[in-house]
C-alpha cells in the first residue's frame, strides 16, 4: 500500500484504506491575496504531531500546537487570521481553531465521531469537513458554523466514500473526492450539496487533496495514474488535465499560493515542496522533523503591511521582569508585556522569546511604519 493510500483507515475504520498517521494531512481551499506563511503538520522525533508554520522561503519555522494528541489538517481562513485544524486520537477527532499565531486554541465541533480536513467558507462563517458521526458506516461531508460548531448539516448521503471537501473561492461550489461510481474520482457539487458532477473518469484513484486556484478557474489534485501518485491540474470543468510532477516518490496534498503563481505539495518522506503553477522549479521548503504532512497557504490582504517577509527586526526587552516564567513568555508571544500591556497593532507578529537573568527578551517582526508604534512603558530596547 502506498504511503498516500495508507491515510484513510485511521480516520474512518476498516472500510477505508487511508491513514493520516502514515503521513497525509490535507490541503484546503486557497483564497486570493498576498502569499503568507505555510502551515504544516509535522511529526517530531518523539512521535508527536503538531501544527507548525514557516515562511515559503523556509525560514522562521515555528511550532503552534503542543498537545499530546495528534494535531494536523491546518486550514487558513480567507483573511489569514485563523487556522482550523483537526485534533484527536484513536476513534475520536474533532475540528479545532486558533489564531494564526497559535493562540486562543478552542474546540469547534463536539460530534463524538471522527471529523477531519476542515475548510473555511469564503465569508469565514462556515467550516466544511468530512468524517464519521457515531453510527455512520461510511464518511460523509458536513458543514457547521465556524464560531461554535452549531448548525451541523450533512451535505452528502451517498453510500460510498465522500472525502476531502474544499470550497470554491466564490463560495458556490465544493470540490471533493468520492468513489460513488466505483473508483475515487474528483467531483464537484453546489455548496448546499446539490447537483453533484464527476470531473475525472479515468481508471486511476484520485486522492488528497483537490484544491481550487485562487481565481477559481483551475483545480489541482493527486492521481495514481502512473502508479505512485503525482500532482495534476485541470480546468474547473474537468477539461485540460495536465500532469505536473514525475518524481518516483508519492506526491499528494496540493495547496495553491494565494497569488496563484505556485503550488505547495507533499513529496513522500522528503517533506513539503513548492513549485510554479506550471510544474517548474520544484524545491523543498524546510526539511524538519521525521514526517511533514500536507501544507496550507496563508492568504494575506493585498493591501496589508503584514507581509510574510518583514522589512526590519526590532528587538524589545522587558526590563522590570524578575524572571521569564511561563506566563510572561506566553504574554510576550501574543505581543504583550508581563503586565499585559499591548505592544501595538503588531501584537500578532511577535516571534520567539529568550530567557535572561534580567527578564524576558522577545524578538518581534515589524515593518518600519509600525516599529514606531510600540506603546508599552515597561518595554526598553536592548
Image (tube, rainbow, N blue to C red):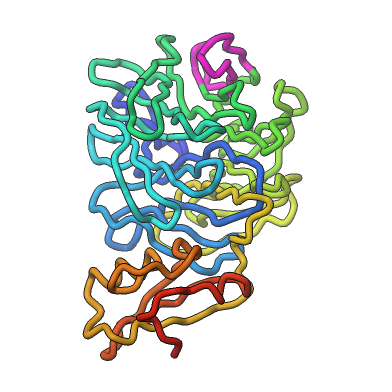
**Residue 69, above or below 150:** below
Residue at the (64%, 48%) spot, across then down: 257
Could you tell me residue 377's position as x and y percent?
38, 79
* Residue range of the region highlighted in magenta in the rendering: 178-198
**Horizontal relation, residue 280 to residue 207: left or right:** right
Residue at the (57%, 36%) spot, across then down: 29
Quadrant in which the N terminus is drawn: top left
Quick check: can you spot residue 249? no
Q: Nearer the viewer, residue 162 or 303?
A: 303
Could you tell me residue 259's position as x and y percent?
70, 48
Name which quarter of the figure residue 375 lies in: bottom left
Residue at the (22%, 83%) spot, across then down: 323
Residue at the (65%, 46%) spot, across then down: 258
Magenta stretch: includes residue 279: no
**Horizontal relation, residue 368 to residue 184: left or right:** right
Q: Nearer the viewer, residue 342 or 123?
A: 342
Magenta stretch: includes residue 179: yes
**Horizontal relation, residue 286 to residue 218: left or right:** left
Could you tell me residue 109's position as x and y percent?
30, 31
Amino acid at each position: 500500500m502506498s504511503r498516500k493510500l495508507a491515510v484513510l483507515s485511521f480516520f474512518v475504520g476498516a472500510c477505508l484504506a487511508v491513514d493520516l498517521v502514515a503521513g497525509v494531512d490535507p490541503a484546503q481551499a486557497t483564497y486570493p491575496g498576498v502569499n503568507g506563511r505555510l502551515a504544516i503538520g509535522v511529526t517530531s522525533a518523539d512521535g508527536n504531531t503538531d501544527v507548525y508554520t514557516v515562511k515559503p522561503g523556509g525560514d522562521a519555522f515555528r511550532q503552534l500546537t503542543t498537545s499530546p494528541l495528534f494535531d494536523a489538517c491546518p486550514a487558513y481562513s480567507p483573511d489569514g487570521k485563523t487556522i482550523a485544524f483537526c485534533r484527536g486520537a484513536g476513534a475520536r477527532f474533532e475540528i479545532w481553531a486558533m489564531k494564526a499565531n497559535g493562540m486562543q486554541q478552542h474546540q469547534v465541533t463536539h460530534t463524538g465521531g471522527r471529523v477531519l480536513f476542515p475548510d473555511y467558507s469564503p465569508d469565514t462563517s462556515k467550516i466544511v469537513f468530512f468524517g464519521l458521526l457515531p453510527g455512520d458506516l461510511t464518511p460523509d461531508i458536513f458543514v457547521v458554523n465556524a464560531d461554535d460548531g452549531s448548525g451541523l448539516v450533512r451535505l452528502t448521503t451517498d453510500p460510498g466514500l465522500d472525502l476531502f471537501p474544499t470550497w470554491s473561492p466564490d463560495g458556490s461550489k465544493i470540490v471533493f473526492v468520492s468513489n460513488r461510481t466505483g473508483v475515487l474520482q474528483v467531483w464537484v457539487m453546489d455548496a448546499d450539496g446539490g447537483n453533484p458532477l464527476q470531473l475525472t473518469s479515468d481508471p486511476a484513484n484520485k486522492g488528497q487533496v483537490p484544491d481550487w486556484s485562487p481565481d477559481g478557474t483551475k483545480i489541482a489534485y493527486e492521481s495514481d495514474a502512473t502508479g505512485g501518485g503525482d500532482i495534476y491540474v485541470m480546468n474547473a470543468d474537468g477539461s485540460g488535465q495536465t500532469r505536473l510532477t514525475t518524481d518516483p516518490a508519492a506526491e499528494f496534498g496540493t495547496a495553491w499560493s494565494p497569488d496563484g503563481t505556485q503550488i505547495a505539495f507533499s513529496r513522500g518522506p522528503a517533506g513539503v515542496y513548492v513549485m510554479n503553477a506550471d510544474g517548474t522549479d520544484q524545491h523543498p521548503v524546510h526539511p524538519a522533523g521525521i514526517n511533514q504532512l500536507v501544507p496550507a497557504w496563508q492568504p494575506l490582504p493585498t493591501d496589508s503591511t503584514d507581509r510574510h517577509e518583514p522589512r526590519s527586526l526590532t528587538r524589545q526587552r522587558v526590563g522590570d521582569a524578575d524572571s521569564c516564567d511561563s506566563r510572561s513568555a506566553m504574554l510576550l508571544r501574543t505581543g504583550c508585556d508581563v503586565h499585559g500591556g499591548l505592544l501595538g497593532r503588531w501584537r500578532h507578529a511577535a516571534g520567539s522569546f529568550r530567557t535572561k537573568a534580567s527578564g524576558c527578551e522577545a524578538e518581534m517582526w515589524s515593518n518600519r511604519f509600525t516599529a514606531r508604534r510600540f506603546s508599552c512603558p515597561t518595554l526598553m530596547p536592548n
